[in-house]
Image (cartoon, helix red, strand yellow):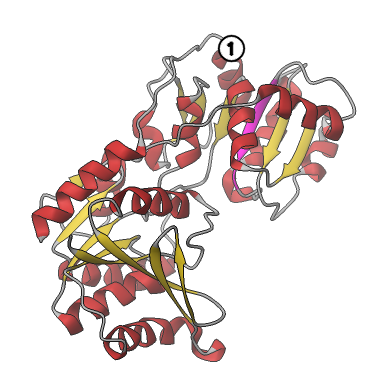
Amino acid sequence: MSDIAVFCSSYFPNPVGGGERTAKWIVDYLKKTFNPTIYSFGDVYKRYEWDGVPIVQLKTPSLARTSARPYALSQRLVKEGQKHDLIYCHGLSGPHAISAAVASLTSKTKLVYHTHSSFMGRESAKHRYLLRPLIRAETAIADSVIFVSNLEKKELVTRGYISDSGEIVIENGVTHVDVDSEKFEALLDDRVNHSVSEYILSVGDVTPEKGQEKTVNALKEIPQVDYILIGEVKRDPIHVAEQHGVEDRVHVLGPLSYELTRSAMAGASCLMHISDWESYGLVVAEALAEGTPCVVTDNCGVASLIENGENGYIVGHDSDISEIVKKCANVNPSPKFRSWKDVASEVSHELNQQL
């Protein structure tokens, strides 16, 4: 089997966001057809294994952490004498993405990027003047680029992050989970001081950029519906709820296990994912796998999965959220499931094409 170097973010193999979960699940299948070695980052340098896959975690000086990581990692690759047939990098932005380009150039090893990095919505100066030329340079080196959605590809090409040279699109998958509705209902009984008969759901960091405060603001027009938020709390929207007198119907549960989160999705009347921008939005695909309608903004890459009125709604930033949520009561989509095994099979095919 061919040896491949897999470049991932610093959270591997403990997934936090959708990008990390995607990388973990794809590598779990790739190890059946390749010999992968994972290169990542952390507070200390160490070597260990995850389910038989060797992982090299690199420590870099704290005062020059961002700039030192790419060069330190490429030097570590050379120093350890690692030889790979191909470099597979998950993501276009971040130190690991730069490291993949540096390692490819220094070792003359073929490079494949798997994106999770479109920049939907308004571009900041950081995007225009730093990330755009950086990503153009990275992808110019690459032998292949895999996009996770047609919208993401269109976004990156249209905004000049990458040239349109026939790169392929492989939609993300979803992990099968046996949901436990009773266990989640028991958690609600323990955490909420009244019976919850119907709820809408948000999954992801609780922050204004994710749009939860907009949903709280609309809740006053949606009587008898609770709003449950699952994820790390960056800014609690309870102050907005208090302004509108709906604080008794807003429940911030914090992070939950993956199984409990999927159980929450299965019982929700709809999933709200109205981010200012989102590279993909894996939680939407996961909710659709449970047959739960989703409301997403047109600045989310995963909007390519939504058909208005069939499995949810795509909204703009000035849309009437309360009316959209009410419409979801009449939407009953069939569960849509695409396995990571199928995704990994397509990724494996593309990697083999480059070998």
Regarding residue 301, the answer to whether it shows in the image is yes
Q: Identity of the amino acid at label 1?
A: Ala
Q: Looking at the picture, how far across and down is residue 290, in whole percent? A: 51, 23
Q: Looking at the picture, how far across and down is residue 105, in whole percent? A: 18, 80
How many numbered marks have been drawn onto this rendered protein structure? 1
Closer to the camera, 256 or 216? Answer: 256
Locate the N terminus by quadrant: bottom left
Which residue in the protein does label 1 denote?
329
User: Hey, which quadrant is residue 289 in on the image?
Assistant: top left
Look at the picture and state if 134 lies above or below 70. above
The crowd level at tag 1 (other Cα within 10 Å; few <14, some 14-19, many 20+) is few
287 left or right of 32?
right
Q: Looking at the picture, how far across and down is residue 291, in whole percent? A: 49, 19
217 left or right of 18?
right
* Residue 200 belongs to magenta span: yes
Q: Residue furthest right?
A: 193
Closer to the camera, 50 or 191? Answer: 50
Residue in the picture at 80% in, 43% down: 238
Closer to the camera, 317 or 34? Answer: 34
Which SS class for mark 1?
A: loop
Q: Looking at the picture, how far across and down is residue 270, in whole percent? A: 58, 23
Residue in the picture at 17% in, 66% down: 142
**Magenta residue span:** 199-204
Residue in the picture at 79% in, 21% down: 196
Locate the C terminus by quadrant: bottom left
